Amino acid sequence: MPQLMKMIALKLSDIAKRFGPTVALDGVNLQLRQGEVHALIGENGAGKSTLMNILAGAFPPDRGLMEIGGRRYAPASPLDARRRGIALIHQELSLAPHLTVAENILMGLEPARWGWLDRETARRKTLEVLESFHHPEIRPNRRVADLPLAARQVVEICRAMAARANIILMDEPTSSLQRDDVAHLFALIRRLRSDGVGIIYISHFLEEVREIADTYTVLRDGLSVSTSVLSSVTNDELITHMVGRSVENLFPSREPGRADEVLLEVRDLSAPPDLRHASFDLYAGEILGVAGLMGSGRTEMVRAIFGLETAQSGSFKLRSKAMVASGGSPTLRLMQGLGYLSEDRKGEGLALALSVADNTTMTRFASCSRWGWLDRTAQREQTEAWITQLGIKARSPLQPSRTLSGGNQQKVALARLLHQDADVLLLDEPTRGIDIGSKAQIYQVIARCAEENKAVLMISSYLPELFGMCDRIAVMTRGRLSPARPVDEWTPETVMLAAIGGEVEGGNVISNRPMEEAEEARA
Amino acid sequence: MVAATKDEKALATPTFLKAWLARLGPFIGLILVIAVFALLTESPARYLSPFNLRIVLAQTVIVALGAIGMTMIIVSGGIDLSVGSIIALSSVVTALMLRAGYPPAMAVVAGVCVGGLVGLVNGLVITGLRVVPFIATLGMLGIARGVAKWIAGQQTVNVPQTWVNELAVTFPTPSWLLLAPGVWVALLLSVLTAVVLRNTVFGRRVFALGSNEAAARACGIPVRRLKLWIYSLAGLYVGLAGVTQMSRLRQGDPTVAIGAELDIIAAVVIGGGSLSGGEGSILGSMIGALIMAFLRNGCQQMGWPNYIQEIIIGGIIVIAVAIDRFRHSRTFT
């Protein structure tokens, strides 16, 4: 094992941290060697981010010992951590968009003489780090706001390099990247590794972890429960470690129950420019999956149905009662029994500053109010019921939603739909960015809704999820929705091909017709 | 390789143009305001005369000095609502010192330092007590005004005739000065501060702080100390504005400059400063101050009543920011 020969760059022993009554970390051991990519795996809320923040000097641990290169490490501040060669690359980019590339890369370490910026040195240093990344469009004097997302990620990594970091912490660095850019990032990581940099890599995606990391540590409930070489474990074993039980049945087994009652009938819906044409029937008790690339018009379709986007044409029938598509408002749709789960949890899914109780009951305050006066006790009790039923990890219904982990926030958003008692659930990426344990729970909730004869429309980019959950699948391609077909008539390959613009007939894929192309060009 | 450079140029040109348009925006606004009034008045020659120009500049000095400090604060993502009260306090302190017979230079320094001190207190409340700048300085707006009235005994403070009274006159005594000494001082300080914001580590960190405070902290920038410096320095400028205020009135008046903070913030915002931080320039703010001064002066020349001025200036602020938003919606996508 050549890895064992390398020097230990970072060693953590028995790290613990509490925030008030919440135990975030409860004894974490971890060893990172030079020139190694070490995956830190765990569900949301397992304590990964807390651990990263302790390492980066944001706050000290309550207990435990940290060593860098055999010497005790107790950073007093982020600056201190940076001086000791630790750099944290955040999940959300932490760049100053108004400043230039050079200013961002050298932030905090600006070369200067008597307080006056030495722009020439700054430029030279920036070019030095940029040199290894083959991104000619990233010039030192360019404003970061003008760079594409992937390039900003490079700038962020350059900042870590400029500080001569020999330990880099990456917190889900690929969450905002496209596929190509992920490949670039991995190339970068391999370069850093061969230069002897130790990297701790946090990710939800096991495939991704397998591709890039050498060793791993699994965190569960603030404890490091397993650590070894990645090639020695299977994905199933990793998942078992993460959730503390085996998730053989990630997807609940459900009857392909499909009542014959059409709850929602959509005809010729269009909302240009993104949505051109969609027609489908949604039956009571079924789960209809909508696949498609991001930006294909999937989201615009459900938003148009829900009245958040103006439909240009089309008609709905809800329980056989006709209504025109345009002119619907979310208020009206809510009253009609439609429920919408946004893909943008932070932006519009939840009011993060408000409590779990407020978020849960928001769409149906009538359930806990009289003459406009809120009955706080009733509100709390109703919310508590949902917390128990969905297994939401919250101390109290009055806890601000912001303080919950992503998976639990998503459960709150779902609890709102359930509390609203919507008959038609429009779910946009219901499990994006959340951990496997929460996913399994959310799948169960969705399946239960279908059992209760509600109609579920589920948009997803994650194909296993569509195949595991849905009765029928339709594919959105450049604003046009294909007819829905039973799930066993699809394969993941045919769904992907349909999504990227091929056409499926009788299971065979036929490539784009030139007619269609010409039409695209005209429009 | 050739293709790549071409692409780059194609990419670079519009951003370059946009940047220049953004810089020229306030300039165009200023020229527009002057042109409109020159056309409206019966005697454009008088409106555009050096005589009138001097009046406008002398009137601008107070807002301009305040706007230099406010630009730093707004660029850093903060706000200071207490500047009007600081101007009053500092004018009263200066007047009291002069009346008590201290040398004029000392009185001026005291006035300036009182401003700096109040700024420092603002900074301490914001960083130490973690009160958001809006609230911290809203509190100071009341406190500083109250202290000014208290130490002035609730009345104006008359001062003996000294050179301090000549700081902001329309016609300076050595006539070769052309403009009031206060105008020259403001000009000098604005150039100095612009250079500091552009070329020093301090200046760039002010921008970094306003653009992304979390990132600045994570990069080891001492955020709290930086804020203390920003509010204190801004306070010094506002203190100087207070001295100038005293000089114009030739008395210390604790009830002066009520609402001046809004004029000063408006100047910065019209000049391209963003209240969410990270953006703004001294040059822009100075032009913003001039736009407002020319508007006021133009309205007076036209004989329009005061309320018309207020309506027009209010409208200009909204339009300036709306144009700015429009520009942003295109840049940041």
Image (tube, helix red, strand yellow):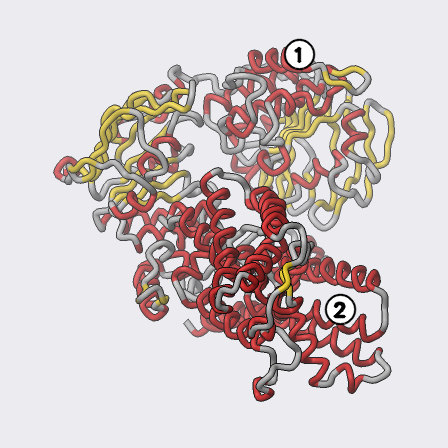
**Proximity of marks 2 and 1: CB atoms separated by less than 8 Å:** no
Residue A408 falls left or right of residue A38:
right
| Quarter the N terminus of chain A occupies | top left
Q: Check the image and report above or below for B46 versus B202.
A: below
Q: Can residue A295 be seen? A: no
Q: How many marks?
A: 2
Q: Give the residue displayed 55% in from the left and 74% down from the top.
A: B187
Q: Check the image and report above or below for A224 versus B130.
A: above
Residue B154 falls left or right of residue A467:
right
Q: Badge 2 local density, few (<14 within 10 Å), some, or many (20+)?
A: many
Residue that badge 2 annotates: B296
The chain identifier of the residue carrying mark 2 reads: B
Could you tell me the amino acid type at mark 1?
Thr
Q: Secondary structure at mark 1?
A: helix
Q: Position of residue A370 (x, y in %)?
A: 79, 15
Gap between marks 2 and 1, in whole Å? Answer: 58 Å
| Quarter the C terminus of chain A occupies | bottom right
Instruction: Say which quarter of the image contains residue B157.
Output: bottom right
Residue that badge 1 annotates: A377
Q: Give the residue displayed 75% in from the left and 69% down from the top.
A: B296
Q: Check the image and report above or below for A476 versus A46.
A: below
Q: Position of residue A292 (x, y in %)?
A: 60, 40
Q: Nearer the viewer, residue B198 or A408?
A: B198
Q: Nearer the viewer, residue A458 or B217?
A: B217
